[in-house]
């Protein structure tokens, strides 16, 4: 932590040691992913806007929004939390498309890590990351502190809400679907909801929305608990306690047990479902402690090498 | 040493258990309040039964609000770009698709492209004939301004109706005002009306049209289940349900007789019913005597009783 305070620019040491690209790689790839997903949904509307005469219908790579979409007009995708709410609401005549779509999405996020949705896809992440960035720039500290497990309660609550109201009640205010839908279909007053989330994260609670409240994140955390793709800290003995990873990590509470758990025999894998696989810790660590890998393999032999020659092991 | 340690940890665990329970209660209350807020909002947001019209094949509103993921694929698939997703603050539940008939009615595509890609079946995939769609029902709401009711020829709504001659018919009526013309009145038949709104779009009135599409539950009444529409029952059963020999129950004025075996009302030569004094109970007899005013043959006179006197 001491070093982190000394370094005004997080990742400065990493840039010096590893170079600029290696220190921003995952962050940039993540933004690229977020923006290109938005663009894919927007291809045809943009095409129609640019040339109203042209037949843009062929350009539908993906149609709809994050709630439900169709890839190439054939492969259905559906948000599994939405399907859960639908089931809870008592609507039983759900068409196969939605069920198959939810399974495809679920399998995908199971494989790559549940909360990859949060950090690589969700558009609200850009908003809350911006709030966090500004919060750090303005040196705002403190604010409301509340449990990070609230999100699981909220997840339960929205399911109960669906059952009680018999409708997808949470979708009336869900900022995640509201932003993604609004960007393509019109936001109007929806901007207020997004601004509210931004201000909440900026002034009320540090990383308040995504890591404390959002029930979609909670659902994907549950998926992530069993995902095979994880951030590993095989080279944790190289850690020099600079504390930069704690600063950039949206869920810093999950880092310490793994980073400092060598004596306690904790497996060098961040197994917590809350990890978003954003890879920011991989970026900022000058000592190259972290890397993406599978959760099962024990890389002890590699670690020994890593301590001797760190640059070789990072894959 | 070990004793005090265990006591200490016991105390600690008691405190942390209390704190844990307190935290849990706090969390539950907070989340509960959040949920209550959304729940109440949803009650009001979903309770405003939308005047906006849903795309063809949409399930009944309660089911629709549970089924629609608000993905907007139907909006994308509509070749005429009439569908919109409701934005927060609109009168339609956030994110759900609708169209506004006055500005952009459903063009009734034969292949109904908005339906097949609907992932959840919120738009019913079994609807394949657009003429069977039930998006709403057109109603001639303003029978004072509609120029047909003013005695002018218009029939624009009749002519644009895609279910031509069935959903809207023109019924000639006597023009009482002029006394010698016919009025060509548009009449909607809900059974065939798809609710596409082409008539609403075409209505020649300014801003607000005389014919409007409403969701069916707003446009139509609900006939009490004990009513039987005789002529329809007759059609369905291939004949009258009432046999000639069934004795009728008539609510006739007292003393008036009705012969059900073909003769009909028992009347004198002038056609006035013969009152059988023997059938009248004595109490009523005196009342009849007291009521000296002759009863008018025109039922309107009875309905309007007292209005003129009040004036």
Image (cartoon, coloured by chain):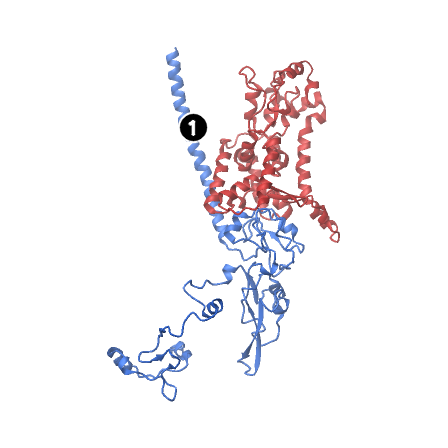
Residue A118 appears in the figure: no
Mark 1, chain letter?
B
Drawn side of residue A19 relative to residue A113, left or right: right
Query: Is A220 above or below relative to B61?
Result: above
Residue B221 appears in the figure: yes
**In the rendered image, which residue does mark 1 sit on?**
B20
B238 or A273: nearer the viewer: B238
Q: Colour of chain A?
A: red
Q: Quadrant of the C terminus of chain A?
A: top right
Q: Residue furthest bottom?
A: B269
Q: Position of residue A110 (x, y in %)?
A: 59, 32
Q: Position of residue A36 (x, y in %)?
A: 69, 38
Query: Is A299 above or below relative to B113?
Result: above
Query: Is A237 above or below relative to A78?
Result: above
Sort mark 1 into few (<14), some (14-19) or many (20+) by Cα contacts within 10 Å: few
Q: Colour of chain B?
A: blue
């Amino acid at each position: 932590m001491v070093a982190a305070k000394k370094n005004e620019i997080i990742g400065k040491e990493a840039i010096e040691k590893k170079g600029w690209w290696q220190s921003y790689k995952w962050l940039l790839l993540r933004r690229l992913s977020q923006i290109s997903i938005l663009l894919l949904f927007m291809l045809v509307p943009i095409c129609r806007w640019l040339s109203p005469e042209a037949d843009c219908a062929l350009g539908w790579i993906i149609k709809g929004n994050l709630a439900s979409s169709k890839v190439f007009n054939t492969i259905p995708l559906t948000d599994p939390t939405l399907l859960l709410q639908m089931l809870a609401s008592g609507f039983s005549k759900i068409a196969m498309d939605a069920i198959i779509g939810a399974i495809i999405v679920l399998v995908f996020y199971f494989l790559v890590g549940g909360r990859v949705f949060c950090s690589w896809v969700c558009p609200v992440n850009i908003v809350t990351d911006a709030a966090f960035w500004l919060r750090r720039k303005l040196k705002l500290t403190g604010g409301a502190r509340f449990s990070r497990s609230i999100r699981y309660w909220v997840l339960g609550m929205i399911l109960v809400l669906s059952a009680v109201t018999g409708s997808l009640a949470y979708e009336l205010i869900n900022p995640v679907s509201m932003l993604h839908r609004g960007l393509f279909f019109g936001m109007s007053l929806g901007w207020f909801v997004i601004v509210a989330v931004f201000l909440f994260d900026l002034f009320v609670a540090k990383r308040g929305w995504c890591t404390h409240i959002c029930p979609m994140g909670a659902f994907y955390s549950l998926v992530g608990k069993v995902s095979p793709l994880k951030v590993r800290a095989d080279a944790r003995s190289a850690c020099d306690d600079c504390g930069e990873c704690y600063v950039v990590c949206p869920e810093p509470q999950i880092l310490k047990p793994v980073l400092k758990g060598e004596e306690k025999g904790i497996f060098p894998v961040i197994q917590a479902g809350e990890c978003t696989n954003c890879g920011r810790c991989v970026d900022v660590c000058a000592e190259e402690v972290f890397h993406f890998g599978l959760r099962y393999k024990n890389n002890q032999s590699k670690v020994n090498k890593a301590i001797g020659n760190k640059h070789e092991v990072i894959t | 040493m070990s004793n005090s340690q265990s006591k200490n940890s016991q105390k600690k665990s008691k405190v942390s258990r209390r704190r844990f329970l307190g935290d849990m209660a706090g969390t539950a209350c907070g989340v509960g309040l959040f949920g209550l807020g959304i729940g109440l909002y949803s009650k009001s947001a979903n309770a405003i039964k939308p005047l906006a019209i849903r795309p063809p094949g949409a399930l009944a509103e309660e089911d629709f609000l549970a089924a629609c993921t608000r993905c907007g694929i139907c909006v994308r698939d509509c070749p005429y770009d009439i569908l919109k997703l409701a934005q927060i603050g609109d009168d339609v539940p956030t994110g759900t698709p609708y169209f506004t008939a006055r500005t952009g009615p459903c063009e009734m595509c034969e292949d109904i492209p908005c339906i097949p890609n609907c992932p959840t079946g919120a738009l019913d995939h079994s609807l394949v004939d657009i003429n069977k769609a039930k998006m709403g029902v057109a109603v001639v709401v303003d029978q004072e301004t509609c120029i047909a009711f003013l005695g002018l020829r218009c029939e624009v709504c009749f002519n644009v109706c895609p279910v031509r001659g069935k959903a809207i018919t023109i019924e000639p009526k006597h023009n009482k005002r002029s006394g010698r013309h016919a009025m060509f009145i548009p009449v909607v038949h809900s059974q065939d009306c798809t609710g596409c709104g082409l008539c609403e779009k075409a209505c020649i009135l300014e801003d607000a049209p005389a014919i409007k599409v409403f969701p069916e539950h707003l446009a139509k009444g609900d006939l009490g289940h004990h009513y039987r529409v005789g002529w329809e029952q007759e059609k369905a059963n291939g004949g009258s349900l009432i046999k000639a020999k069934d004795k009728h129950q008539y609510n006739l004025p007292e003393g008036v007789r009705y012969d059900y075996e073909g003769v009909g009302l028992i009347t004198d030569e002038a056609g006035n019913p013969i009152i059988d004094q023997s059938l009248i109970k004595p109490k009523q007899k005196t009342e009849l005597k007291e009521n000296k005013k002759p009863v008018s043959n025109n039922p309107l006179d009875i309905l309007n009783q007292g209005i003129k006197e009040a004036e």
